[in-house]
Image (cartoon, helix red, strand yellow):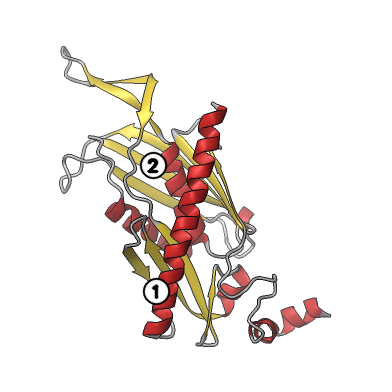
Amino acid sequence: MAAGFKIAEPLEYHMSFLKENCRPDGRELSEFRTTTLNIGSISTADGSALVKLGSTTIICGIKAELTNPTVEAPGKGYIVPNVDLPPLCSSRFRPGPPGEQAQAASQFIADVIESLLSLLQLCWVLYCDIMCLDYDGNILDACIIALLAALKNTRLPKVTINKVTCKPEVDSKERHKLPVHKHPVSTSFSIIENSILIVDPTADEESLSTARLSVVTDEDDRLCSLHKPGGTSLSAEKLQTCINRATARQREIQKLMEKVLKSVKAAQ
């Protein structure tokens, strides 16, 4: 009967839980789903990671190529993120060109990474393919975690300039770490019925939300980005609550990432 009530009256179903300060999956309003991280999942990539945020599953693979630097930044390489939401991850997505949600996620990630990470590698371009394997809401947080972990896992081959031909030569056998100087983490919230604030929304909760907000903070507790694509307004008090929760979340994810990287290094 509960399943029928959820399908027939999804808002009423969720509100019956939210009024009691809990959610249908048993979480509190400010509680994240279990987050798991696997680094080095794709052996053919220069760096990779797989993240599970509850049922939401994201995998990121990075391929590095030498290219001409951009006119705007002639002394730097750059990152090209691409988020793919294929039909295999959810029936709500259709085959074909990237939809609006995938394009918005790619742009959000590009903005975050552009402002917080510096490759410090001349003429390297990193193609970051981020694919959703299972969709159950909050892909922005999962994508940022997967990308950051994959970047920290990336090993770039040694490049030398041939003195005769003046062309670069790549030595794939000798590799070095990609220097990642910042650790941005996204924390996403949904507002339901214009007043109830929840963190890490599921797909069902996102569909019922009247507004969404993603807060990006780094390891120095600095506010790096706020992403709110329309919807109802948010009071200063609730905004501060979101920032405080995002700051705590950044520490949790950085600790998890350091733990996994340490275990991977020990296994090598």
Q: Secondary structure at mark 1?
A: loop
Mark 2 — residue?
127
- Between disc 1 and disc 2, whose residue precedes? 2
On screen, residue 169 above or below 32: above
Residue 103 coordinates in the image, percent (x, y):
42, 60
Query: Which one is in front, 190 or 208?
Result: 190
Amino acid carrying label 1: it is Lys
Q: Nearer the viewer, mark 1 or mark 2?
A: 1
Amino acid type assigned to the residue bearing label 2 in the image: Tyr
Mark number displayed over residue 155 = none
Q: Residues within 10 Å of mark 1 (few under 14, many from 20)?
A: some
The quadrant of the rendering that contains the N terminus is bottom right
Disc assigned to residue 228: 1
Q: Nearer the viewer, residue 60 or 189?
A: 189
Residue 246 position, x and y percent, is 44, 66
Instruction: Locate residue 93, reporting x and y percent.
Output: 58, 62
